[in-house]
Structure formats: C-alpha cells, structure tokens
Amino acid sequence: MRAALLVARRELAGYFATPVAYVFIVIFLMIAGAMTFSLGGFFNRGQADLGPFFGFVPWLFLFLVPALTMRLWAEERRLGTIELLLTLPMAQWQAVLGKFLAAWAFCAIALALTFPLVLTVNYLGRPDNGVIAAGYGACLLMAGAYLAIGSAMSAMTKNQVIAFVLAVAVCFLFAVAGSALVTDFLSQRMPVLAEVARALSLTERFNSLTRGVIALRDAVFFASFIGFWLFVNAVVLDHRKAD
Amino acid sequence: MAALIEIERLTKRFGAFTAVDDVSFQVNRGEVVGFLGPNGAGKSTTMKMLAGFVTPSAGTARICGQDVIEAPVAAKRALGYLPEGAPTYPEMTVTGFLHFIARIRGFGGAEAHERMARAMAMTQLEGVRLQPIETLSKGFKRRVGLAQALLHDPPVLVLDEPTDGLDPNQKHEVRELIRRMAPEKAIVISTHILEEVDAVCTRAIIIARGKVLADATPKQLEAPGKTLEQVFRDLTLKQEAA
C-alpha cells in the first residue's frame, strides 16, 4: 500500500506539472456551472438544492474522465517509463492502484472546486446539506467507476484516441444500462437480461444516492465495480506491458 | 557460492518470431559481462526478461537466487536496471525523481538523502540537481538513469547501453565507475562499442538472432590474432548468411 501511495503522489504532482490539470479543471468548472445555471434553471426552480448540478455531472464525467485516463498508461509507454515503473520492487497491482488513486484524488479536487455552488444555495435558502454531501459522494463514486473503466482501456492500447473512444463507449454502456429505453427493449425480448442491465446500471444507483438515500449495497456495488475494473487493468497490463 | 545471475534456457517468442532462443549463462560476483550483438539480436529482450519486464516463453532467470517470475519483488530489490534509452519522468527534477525512487526502494528520511547524494556524486549530477529532467542534455539524462540504478547499491547491475549518447569524457567516466564497482557486483552491460568491451569487461557474450555464438574473455576471443571487431563480424555475418 505504501508503494501505491508513493506512486499516487508522484502521479498527482505530474498532473499539475503539465497544463492537463488546469485545462481539465477550468473546462469542468465552466461547463458544470453553465449547465447548472442555464440548462438546469438553478434560479427559476425556486428550490434550495443542487439537483440540476448533480444531474449533469455524470454526463460531463462521461467525456472528461476518459480524457483524463486515456494517457494513463499510454503516456508511460510513450516515454518508456513503464519499463522503469514495473521493474521497481513493488507488485504490479500497486502501480495500478497508485495511478487510479492519483486520478481519483484529482477528480475530487475538481469537484471540491465547485464549492461556490454550495455557498450560493446556502446563502439563498436553507438546503439539506446532508443531501448535498451525499450528492458529492455519489459524484466521486461515479468518477471512480469511470476512472477504473478508463484506466483498463488505456492499458489495452498504445493509441490514446482508441483508449478515449473505448472508455467513453464502455462508460456509456454502464450509464444507460438502467434507462427505460434499454430495459423496455430488453424486457420485451429477454426479460432476464433486463434485470441484469438494471442491476449493473451506474445511473440508477447514482440517482438514489443523490436523493440522499445512502444504502450500503450501493456503496458495496461501486467498490466492487471499481475493484473489478482495476483487476482487469492489472491483468491486461501484465499481458501487454512489453508490447 | 551460487552465481548472482543465473539464466537457464531462456526463450522468448513473439508469434512465429523467436527473439531469444535457448540462452543460458551465469554471472558471478566480480564479473563484468559485455553483451554484444547486431541490432535486433535479442540483447534488450534478454535484459528485459532478466529485469522481470518481459515474461519469458520458456526457461528461467534468477537474481541472487530469486526467480524473476516466482519472486519478482525480491529479485527486483537485488537488481539495479537501466532500461534501453534511460527513461525518466521528464517533468520531475533530478532530486525529485531520485527521491521517488529512493522512497519506493524503502529508504526514508536521512538515509534517502544520503543515498541520493552518493548516487549523484557517482554520476556527477550535483550541478543539475534542481533542474527538471526534460531540460537536461542527453548525456545528463542517461546519467540520471544510471543514478537511479545505483541508488540502492544493488549486488546485480543490468545496464542497457549505459554509454550511448555520452561524449568521450563522459564515456570514460562511466567506464571508470563500472570498473570501480566491479569487484563487489555482478554486472551485465550491452553495447555496440567494441573498445568498451576491451576496456571494462572481463567476459564477452556475442549474440545474434537470439542465439549465443560466443562466451569467452575478450582476450580468448582475440586469441587467433584477430581484433574483436573481426571476430564479431565473422560470427554475426556467418549467422545471418545461414
């Protein structure tokens, strides 16, 4: 674990040494703000909550998180540093976990910088801050799930564009799995699969969390979802590291 | 006492292509082995397998008795490895990078700084310690890679082209450094420069198309009154014609 944290620290410092971090944060804050206030009708709703914001964040992450993860392993391959990293005396899962934790901490920083929204609703009304905290937790879990998928995709290919497209596609699949469109289609033809799709849907669980319903099974679901994709990442990396 | 590096029947196939074909050798403490061969002969692949980066298709490699597949972390602890091209993280400073390596290798606090200072002194990096690595010249970058491999004073050193890109003075320094460390370590270096073998190596292994063609001291190879270059050309060109 110690080695994983050391990798994470180096990695996180690396984000801020390049423009990647600043571009990501600025774009995220701009779009999140614009969507919340204009499309979400933040002021017109007359409700003191962050509903519109939490509604848009997962869709924003769907594109921004893969942009973050596409370079995760591809960059190490390009620089050749993957050979250095994986010949240091630590287990491979520690490198995988370290990189994931750094990207996750980075997403947490980006989310934390939306704090003016929280201040605004608290100034305008009396929101349920517990629900807001749950919403932020849900956003972070959602980011973690997308990051885990994205980093596994990045380990699969040397090409950053392919890694990005694959990650968006797979994330989208899990985002819409529980939507009425998919489940209606499946329940008419293969009712068994409809249940599976609903069970694997990230959006459904995200929505129940943002309503303030914190269920242990949702947390367990996100943890095992992330664990599974990190495991895939480690296996793929072991196979393809030297290609 | 067992050899520090033991390679037994090591083979690596990429699809139908055999990059390394049934290579076996051992390196004892005090030996400096020069790994020679044309480009694409399998030198780097052999070294990558020894470092635990490439998984062998068959055969085993052991470092200080630790199998690189069965006990990868223990084997890597005993190894200082300079990968081909001396990769480093470009945005980090020299000290930042070496500190990261020191921490991963389990050194903390004063000991980490002591070891970093020693590694930087050995590779003459003190003058650039606070510069980002991307701003350094090729020679300095190579020496940062070398410092990283020497930091933990490992019993086994595997250096893939340690003097590539260095000017003649720097080459001389690196050779001196290798010679100084040689008595306590088992060292494998790959190189294209044949004088380097004469200058620092106690043994030369010539490899082409993944096969070991010769394994002897430079003196023995030159025994029939030929230069090392002639021996190299004779062996490797014959192999290519076959």
Image (cartoon, coloured by chain):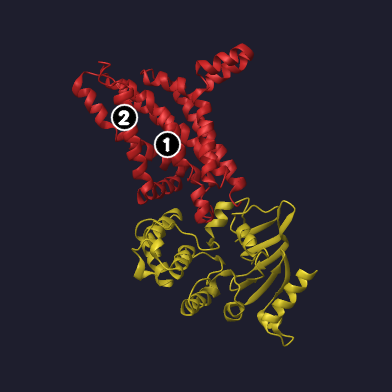
Chain colours: A red, B yellow
Q: Give the vertical position of B86 relative to B222 (above or below).
A: above
Percent from the top left, x then y, of residue A79? 49, 55
Residue A196, by quadrant, is: top right
Percent from the top left, x then y, of residue A112? 31, 34
Q: Which mark identifies residue B186? A: none
Percent from the top left, x then y, of residue A97? 48, 42
Which element carries disc 1, helix, strand or loop?
helix
Three-letter code for the amino acid on which mark 1 is drawn: Leu
Tell me the mark number nearer the camera, choosing from 1 and 2.
Answer: 2
Crowd around label 2: few <14 · some 14–19 · many ≥20 (10 Å): few
Sequence-wise first label, 1 or 2: 2
Q: Which residue matches tag 1?
A: A64
Label 1 and label 2: CA atoms lie apart by 16 Å
In-front residue for pair B175/A2: B175
**Viewed as shown, does residue A129 lie left or right of A74?**
left
- Asked if one can make out residue A81 in the rendered structure from this viewpoint, the answer is no
Q: Give the vertical position of A34 relative to A102 (above or below).
A: above
Which element carries disc 2, helix, strand or loop?
helix
Disc 1 with disc 2 on a shared chain:
yes
Percent from the top left, x then y, of residue A40? 33, 22
Question: Which residue occupies 36% across, 44% down?
Answer: A21
- Asked if one can make out residue A221 in the rendered structure from this viewpoint, the answer is yes
Question: Which residue occupies 45% across, 32% down?
Answer: A62
**Viewed as shown, does residue B163 lie left or right of A7?**
right
Q: Chain of mark 1?
A: A
Q: Give the vertical position of A124 relative to A226 (above or below).
A: above
Residue A166, by quadrant, is: top right
**Viewed as shown, does residue B98 lie left or right of A236?**
left
Q: Which mark identifies residue A34? A: 2
Q: Give the vertical position of A165 relative to B242 (above or below).
A: above
**Viewed as shown, does residue A59 lie left or right of A164?**
left
Extreme-front residue of the structure: A38
